[in-house]
């Protein structure tokens, strides 16, 4: 039975209200103020959201972006057993599958026909380390490891289609970050949390060796040292406290301040699924989501903040009120294999709701416009393909 990890006692609110936090100097928002903001009362929430929207509008005014993608679940075998995951499988379980080269190419080409520019590769973390069946599959495919196979499939998509790969392979060494950056303009790894108590027996990351916060922070840092445009973020509602969310956001902010490589920060909310160990776990409320996004924006006023619309349906447009400037990847072809019960909104609906809030919806590439130069300056196939699909403003050439 999964149990909720113990959190530190919440700090008492000071006498200052949220509105007393002086803006626009939000880059100096202290941890104490952030912790107080993330527990803002319902009466304080409107002003918190107003401050967050103001920070967003100073950063990027009038435009909300998204990436039109195909979701490629290269393998759902995984050595981690997270309490909230329905994606992973053991060998022999119904639905366990490792995609072939032809399957990868077929999905990418079908997405190309629908105007997609991103191939999002998601996969279990190093399943060959515990499953002999995966080692045999890799041997038959002609590769030594899952990362070698991923590298080859990213290169295949890059060479044979107009799509740009964006891999999320889990923990990586500096060497592997360098290798994958040669065949993909960006990559990602969710930090999720810095609360290592979630690794305890019965907690969300019990029996998940790749979810050790220090190891994930190390991977994000190695990407920074390599100058790789990187996506990360937090997962809220898995047993962490609001103060833990602040600490994770600050850890992300501090790495970006040091290396300048984090192109977007995702605020993702846990959703209950019937077949997971956490099936009886409480989901974070809409108010928690809005408060967390707003605090992320105030802590990181000059960074791209994203929240997935399909996890906040039917009223996902409310997330714009908290200061996001990006919807993340949306696919006209493939489901969200991590949350298959939550379909993507149709792009027409996404555009309609975004415009109703006063914004223009723009299709971006998997690498953000302001991070594109560091990829484009590298000679070779990757930079050539990137320039072919980018317009003069470094958004996707294909219209949304």
Image: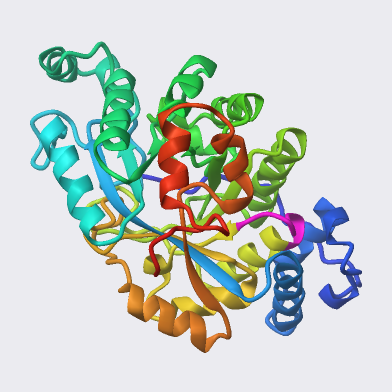
Give the extent of the magenta segment.
298-304
Which is the main secondary structure of the residues drawn in magenta? loop
Q: Determine whether, in the image, residue 226 is placed left or right of residue 312.
A: right
Please name the residue shown 30% across and 27% down the image. Answer: 150
Residue 196 lies, in percent from the top left, at 57, 34
Q: How many marks?
A: 0
Which residue is at the far bottom? 356
Please name the residue shown 46% across and 49% down the image. Answer: 366
Residue in front for this viewpoint, 400 or 4: 400
Whether residue 302 is in magenta: the answer is yes
Above or below for 130 versus 213: above
Residue in front for this viewpoint, 24 or 126: 24
Residue 395 lies, in percent from the top left, at 51, 58
Residue 147 lies, in percent from the top left, at 33, 21
- Give the colouring mode of the picture: rainbow
Please name the residue shown 50% across and 21% down the image. Answer: 178
Whether residue 165 is in magenta: the answer is no
Above or below for 157 versus 136: below
Residue 188 lies, in percent from the top left, at 48, 39
Q: Quadrant of the N terminus?
A: top left
Residue in front for this viewpoint, 298 or 181: 181
Please name the residue shown 42% across and 84% down the image. Answer: 352
* Residue 100 shows in the view: no
Q: Residue 329 is drawn in which quadrant? A: bottom left
Q: Quadrant of the C terminus?
A: bottom left
Above or below for 196 versus 234: above
Q: Residue 248 is drawn in which quadrant? A: top right
Q: Determine whether, in the image, residue 78 is placed left or right of residue 52.
A: left
* Residue 4 shows in the view: yes
Above or below for 296 versus 177: below
């Amino acid at each position: 039975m999964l149990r909720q990890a113990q959190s530190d006692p919440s700090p008492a609110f000071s006498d200052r209200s949220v509105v007393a936090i002086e803006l626009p100097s939000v880059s100096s928002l202290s941890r104490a103020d952030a912790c107080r903001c993330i527990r803002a009362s319902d009466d304080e929430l409107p002003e918190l959201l107003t401050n967050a929207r103001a920070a967003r509008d100073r950063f990027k005014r009038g435009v909300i972006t998204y990436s039109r993608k195909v979701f490629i679940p290269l393998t759902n075998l995984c050595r981690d057993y997270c309490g909230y995951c329905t994606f992973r499988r053991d060998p022999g379980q119904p639905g366990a599958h490792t995609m072939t080269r032809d399957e990868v190419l077929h999905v990418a080409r079908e997405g190309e026909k629908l105007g997609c520019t991103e191939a999002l590769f998601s996969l279990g973390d190093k399943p060959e380390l515990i499953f002999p069946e995966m080692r045999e599959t890799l041997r038959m495919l002609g590769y030594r490891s899952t990362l070698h196979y991923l590298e080859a499939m990213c290169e295949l998509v890059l060479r044979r289609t107009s799509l740009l790969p964006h891999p999320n392979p889990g923990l990586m060494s500096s060497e592997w970050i360098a290798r994958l950056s040669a065949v993909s303009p960006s990559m990602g790894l969710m930090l999720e949390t810095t609360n290592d108590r979630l690794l305890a027996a019965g907690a969300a990351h019990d029996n998940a060796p790749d979810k050790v916060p220090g190891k994930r922070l190390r991977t994000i840092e190695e990407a920074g040292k390599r100058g790789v445009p990187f996506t990360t973020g937090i997962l809220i509602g898995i047993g962490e406290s609001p103060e833990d969310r602040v600490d994770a956001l600050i850890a992300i902010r501090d790495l970006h301040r040091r290396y300048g490589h984090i192109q977007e920060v995702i605020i993702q909310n846990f959703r209950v699924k019937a077949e997971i160990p956490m099936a009886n776990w409480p989901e974070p409320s809409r108010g928690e989501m809005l408060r967390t996004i707003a605090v992320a924006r105030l802590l990181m006023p000059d960074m791209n903040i994203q929240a997935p619309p399909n996890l906040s349906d039917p009223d996902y447009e409310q997330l714009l009120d908290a200061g996001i400037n990006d919807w993340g990847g949306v696919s006209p072809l493939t489901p969200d294999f991590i949350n298959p019960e939550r379909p993507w909104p149709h792009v027409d609906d996404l555009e309609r709701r975004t415009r109703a809030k006063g914004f223009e919806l723009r299709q971006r590439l998997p690498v953000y416009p302001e991070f594109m130069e560091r990829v484009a300056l590298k000679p070779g196939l990757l930079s050539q393909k990137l320039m072919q699909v980018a317009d003069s403003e470094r958004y996707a050439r294909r219209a949304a």
